[in-house]
Amino acid sequence: MSDSRTPDRSTDRLRATCFHCGEPLPAQPVIDTVSGAEQPFCCTGCAAAARWIGEASLDDYYRLRQSDAARVGTETLDYASWDRDDLLSEHSVAVDGGREITLLTDGMRCAACAWLIDRALTREPGVREVAANAVTGRIRIVWDSARTPLSTLLSRLAALGYRPSLATGEARERERRRERNRWLLRLGVAGLGAMQAMMYAEALYLDTAGEMSLATRDFFRWITFLVSTPVVFYAGWPFLEGMWRELRGRRLGMDTLIAGSTLLAYFASLYETLRGGAHVWFDAAVMFVFLLLTARMLEQRARGIASAQVDALARARPALAARERDDGSVEQIPLSALAVGDIVRVAVGEGVPADGEVLGEAEAADTAFDESLLTGESEPVAKTPGAMAFAGSVCRERPARLRVARTGADTRLSQLTRLVERAQEQRPPIARAADRIAGWFVSVLILAAALVYAWWRMHEPARAFEVALAVLVVSCPCALSLAVPAALAAAHGGLAKLGVLALRGEALDTLARADRIVFDKTGTLSDRRPRLAEVESFDGMTGDAALAIAAALERDSGHPLAAAFADAGIAAQPTVTDLRSEPGHGVAGTVDGRAWRLGRAAWAAGRDDDDAVWLGDGARGVARFVLRETPRADAAAALAALRAQGLRVALCSGDAEAPVARMAATVGIAADDVRARQTPEDKLAYVRTRQAAGEIVAMVGDGINDAPVLAGADVSLALADGAALAQRAADFVVTGGALRRIPQAIALARRSRRIVRQNLAWALGYNLLALPLAATGQVTPWIAAIGMALSSLLVTLNALRLNLADATDPGH
């Protein structure tokens, strides 16, 4: 229920602000009943959020927020300031009428955490998509900011126990240091406690003859209890917190098993100590915590390596920018203060703060920029005045002046960061299946432990609890839940280092299984710089006039052949109206009231195909252009590497037979696998034919004409210097345009597929082997903890082999 009555604020100081977000109340606040009491809200959104918290039994959120604010002073759980327009524009991006932001959290440690976050946030009004990645600790949210403010979503995260922070380089480093220090302190407490507890437990174990007095035995037990308590409840707090989140989300996970086993050992030992029982297991409880903390720290280090490319991209931009004032002086400003049109200076060795146009005199020497982080190219790229320099690149050789064109989340660096993050968060069917298996396995394991306890209780009661505890610990499916995500994160990080970005969830596995790869010619195998070799004109049309019309038609087409006409040096080009592209034929438009076509001879000039580009009105031609293309420098070597990997290489092009045959011969493609004069429909039909024959087909293209076949192939790769439509239809984008990266990407995809299989085989095999050993009493609880920790660590380290492989060797 809600109404518009104004509350009495005479005595309650808290009534001066919104009960939920803490913002000042408007003249007519919204009144709603929360937890049996009427509270004021600044808007219906906050009222709805408070109702959700109450319905989800999270009423202690407000109490925790107040206590947390008192503890940390100025750092509170009030995220209203995150709704500021300047912060949103800097750290989020507009997408389809909403906004998208990537956050970090230090509490997401397994698939159950990611599931809980996804489930909670997607219930919020206006939230379109949530992707929580337990491996990298990132949460991507797409939401309608007009319906739900960001502060509401962040408050929800905090109420669940996941403190959010911005996924920027500075924030990431700050959170990394905080998290590392917290874990080191916990590990230190656990290590000291484990040593002391084992020392006292050893004294009890050595009393095999039973000669120790009861008073001495109880003294050692109580001392062990005092040592174990901070280990279990402070050092082991991450596991206890994780168990609480899993239980509150009605989902069993690894933290439930770990924390449950630790608490069982601790309280069972306390009970036995109080009643003077024969056995205690304090040493097992502290060893659980110490060993699993150690393993989790090592896993976090490994995950950090897997997400290193995202972190490197996030840290690439400098903290400040040198902006020119109107009087020519320079001021240092934060990046958030940069605006489109500002002039910035970049010194040698400094990073570029935003995407911008290189400024300088026409005769000035080129400025070089190191774009290795963005494209994977190791050599600096020369930029002439008028060229674009990108945020995250590093200025080399001489200082540069740039006119800012894109800032913040709109820069190419931010776009690449989002692509890599999306690639790492993708969950193919095999990963989702592993999560489902792990969830069921926990339930089955708890039942199995209960049955084992009952059996031992009937046959050897003294060992019943110890054996059941070992069963719970040894078979915890941590390795199973990490097997696929760790490998995928490492693989996508390795792809990003190569300059290949994955855009689809299942593309990596399909790329590994591809057995035929089809290339387009123009702009894909060729170097996108065709030369105009010959010009012929007819019917009174001069060569210069024909070139001017052709250049005007091609100017905005985006086709690689447009470069040949642009390089012809036609300064005065006529205005074109009704410009349109005819896929597979050419471009058409109206110049000075006359309709023109530029493209194939039959379509543009009504003539037989002669391998040239014709200008005409569709019935007759007025000019003929002969173009020459050269293959990319690495085309022949890349295709040879693909054939060495066992792929069948084919060429499908819309060009005439003669230039297509020349290109095929140059790069080493067999004549049987060459198709010329292919329309987009013909290319797609060819791919469908090969798929019908049982082949898994990969397609490589760059133009608008290639979009249908890129979408229709089993897996596709688009070159980053090609058309945007082609990139949107593709599964991978090759950022630097170097073809040699394609066989490298395929080699990495195949290695990742092998490693995923190895990880799953190990995880399943370990659990199937360890469970009967523990059930038969051959494994003690602390040895079980070592086995479980080593198992999860092994699959993570195995996944990291993807980053250790030689990226320059396609056949590795």
Image: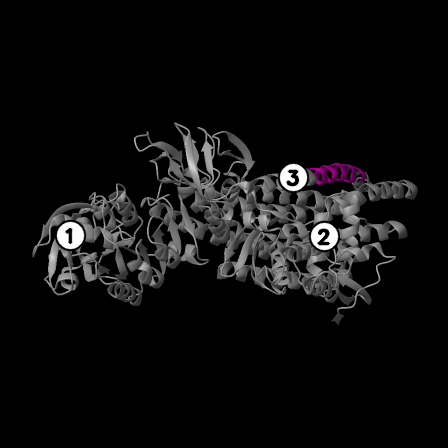
Q: Amino acid at mark 2?
A: Glu
Q: Nearer the viewer, residue 352 or 643?
A: 352
In the shown orientation, is residue 5 left or right of residue 445? right
Query: Looking at the image, which is closer to me, 192 or 745?
Result: 745
In terms of depth relative to the viewer, which is nearer, 559 or 543?
543
Apparent side of residue 263 relative to residue 740 in the rendered image (left or right): right
Q: CA distance from mark 1 to mark 3?
A: 68 Å
Residue 546 is labelled as: 1
Compare residues 43 and 124 and report the one nearer the observer. 43
Between disc 3 and disc 2, whose residue precedes? Answer: 3
Label 1 vs label 2: CA separation?
Answer: 74 Å
Count the marks.
3
As drawn, the label of residue 532 is none
- SS at badge 3: helix
Query: At label 3, which amino acid type do we have?
Result: Arg
Apparent side of residue 584 relative to residue 473 in the rendered image (left or right): left
Secondary structure of residue under mark 1? helix
Magenta stretch: give its range: 184-200
Residue 241's disc number: 2
Among the 4 quarters of the image, the one containing residue 220: top right
Is residue 196 magenta-colored?
Answer: yes
Q: Pointer 1: residues within 10 angstroms few (<14), some, or many (20+)? A: many
At label 1, the amino acid type is Ala
Numbered tag placed on residue 180 in the rendering: 3
The quadrant in which the N terminus is found is bottom right
